[in-house]
Image (cartoon, coloured by chain):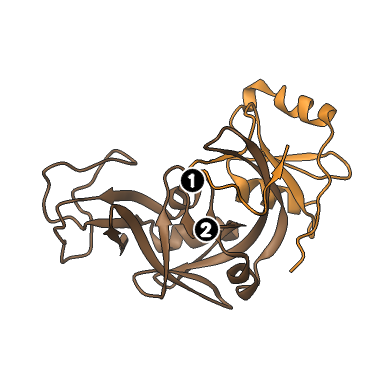
C-alpha cells in the first residue's frame, strides 16, 4: 500500500494555531488545502470534528503549544516511515 | 460492570495478546501477536503496515512525534477498530513496532496495573484499586500481574458513536 502524502501546513498557519495559548495541549486537525483547523482533546475527537465538515478528509495533526503532537520514546530505532523535519 | 483484560510481564516487558482480522485488532488475552504496553509512547497503537492493511485501516493523515533522540518526525496515521471483550472502539494507528500507547490506554481503560508479585485475582476485577490513574502497587496481593481495567461497555460505545 502506497501511503499518500499530505501537504504540510504553512508556518503561518502553524504560528496562528500555536498562538492559541488558552488551547495549549489541545490537538488540532488541520485541513491541508484550506488551512482550516478543528480542535479536540485527542486525535479521535479532533478527527471527528474535522470530518463533520470534510467527511473524507485527511489531516495534519499538531498539539497546540508543543513541537509535536505525541512522543514516541520507547526506542531509538529510526522509523522507516518517518520523515525528518 | 468493569472488566479487565490481563496480559503478562515477560522479561520485564508488559504484553497483551492480540490478533488481526477484517473486524479490526482483537486485543486481550488470546492471539499470536504480542503487543508491548509502552508508556513512552503517548499515541494510539503501532502495528506493522501489513497488519494495518489486513484490517482495512483507513489513512487519515499525518501526526508529529518526538522520538527519544529528540528528533521530531512525521508519521502516517490510520483509523481502525479495536475489539476488547466484544466491545468495539475506534482508535488511531501508526505503522511500526507492536506497541500500545498511552492515548489508547487512557481511552479504553481506567486503571493499568503492573504487579510484580505475580498474584492472580481469580475474580478478574480490580476492586481495590481506586484513585491514581497510573501507579505501581507495592506489597499488595490478589491483583493480576498485569492488566487493564476497561471502562463500562455502554459509556464506551456511546462516546465513540456520538
User: What residue is drawn where x is 62% and y is 35%?
Assistant: B71
Q: Secondary structure at mark 1?
A: loop
The chain coloured brown carries which letter? Answer: B
User: What residue is drawn where x is 19% and y is 51%?
Assistant: B116
Q: Nearer the viewer, residue B84 or B61?
A: B61
Residue ID for mark 2: B97
Res. A75 in view: yes
Q: Nearer the viewer, residue B117 or A85?
A: A85
User: What residue is drawn where x is 64% and y is 26%?
Assistant: A65
Tell me where residue B10 sits by quadrant: bottom left
The chain coloured orange carries which letter? Answer: A
- Pointer 2 and pointer 1 on the same chain: no
The CA distance from mark 2 to mark 1 is: 10 Å
- The quadrant of the rendering that contains the C terminus of chain B is bottom right
Q: Give the image location of residue B103, x and y in percent.
A: 50, 47
Residue ID for mark 1: A75
For residue B104, above or below residue B18: above
Q: Chain of mark 1?
A: A
CB contact under 8 Å: marks 2 and 1 = yes
Q: Looking at the image, which residue sits at the far right?
A: A33
- The quadrant of the rendering that contains the N terminus of chain B is bottom left
Amino acid at each position: 500500500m502506497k501511503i499518500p502524502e499530505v501537504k504540510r501546513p504553512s508556518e503561518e498557519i502553524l504560528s496562528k494555531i500555536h498562538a492559541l495559548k488558552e488551547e495549549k495541549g489541545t490537538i488540532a486537525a488541520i485541513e491541508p488545502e484550506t488551512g482550516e483547523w478543528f480542535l479536540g482533546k485527542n486525535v479521535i475527537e479532533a478527527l471527528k470534528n474535522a470530518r463533520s465538515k470534510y467527511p473524507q478528509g485527511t489531516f495534519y495533526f499538531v498539539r497546540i503549544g508543543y513541537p509535536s503532537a505525541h512522543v514516541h520514546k520507547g526506542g531509538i530505532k529510526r522509523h522507516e516511515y518517518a520523515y525528518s523535519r | 460492570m468493569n472488566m479487565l483484560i490481563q496480559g503478562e510481564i515477560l522479561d520485564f516487558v508488559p504484553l497483551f495478546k492480540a490478533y488481526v482480522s477484517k473486524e479490526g485488532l482483537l486485543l486481550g488475552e488470546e492471539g499470536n501477536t504480542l503487543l508491548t504496553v509502552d508508556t513512552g509512547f503517548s499515541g494510539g497503537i503501532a502495528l506493522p503496515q501489513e497488519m494495518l492493511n489486513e484490517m482495512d485501516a483507513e489513512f487519515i493523515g499525518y501526526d508529529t512525534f518526538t522520538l527519544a533522540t529528540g528528533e521530531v518526525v512525521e508519521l502516517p496515521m490510520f483509523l481502525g477498530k479495536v475489539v476488547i471483550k466484544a466491545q468495539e472502539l475506534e482508535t488511531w494507528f501508526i505503522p511500526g513496532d507492536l506497541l500500545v500507547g498511552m492515548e489508547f490506554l487512557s481511552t479504553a481503560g481506567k486503571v493499568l496495573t503492573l504487579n510484580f508479585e505475580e498474584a492472580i485475582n481469580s475474580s478478574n476485577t480490580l476492586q481495590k484499586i481506586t484513585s491514581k490513574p497510573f501507579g505501581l502497587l507495592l506489597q499488595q496481593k490478589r491483583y493480576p500481574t498485569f492488566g487493564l481495567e476497561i471502562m463500562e461497555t455502554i459509556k464506551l460505545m456511546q462516546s465513540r458513536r456520538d
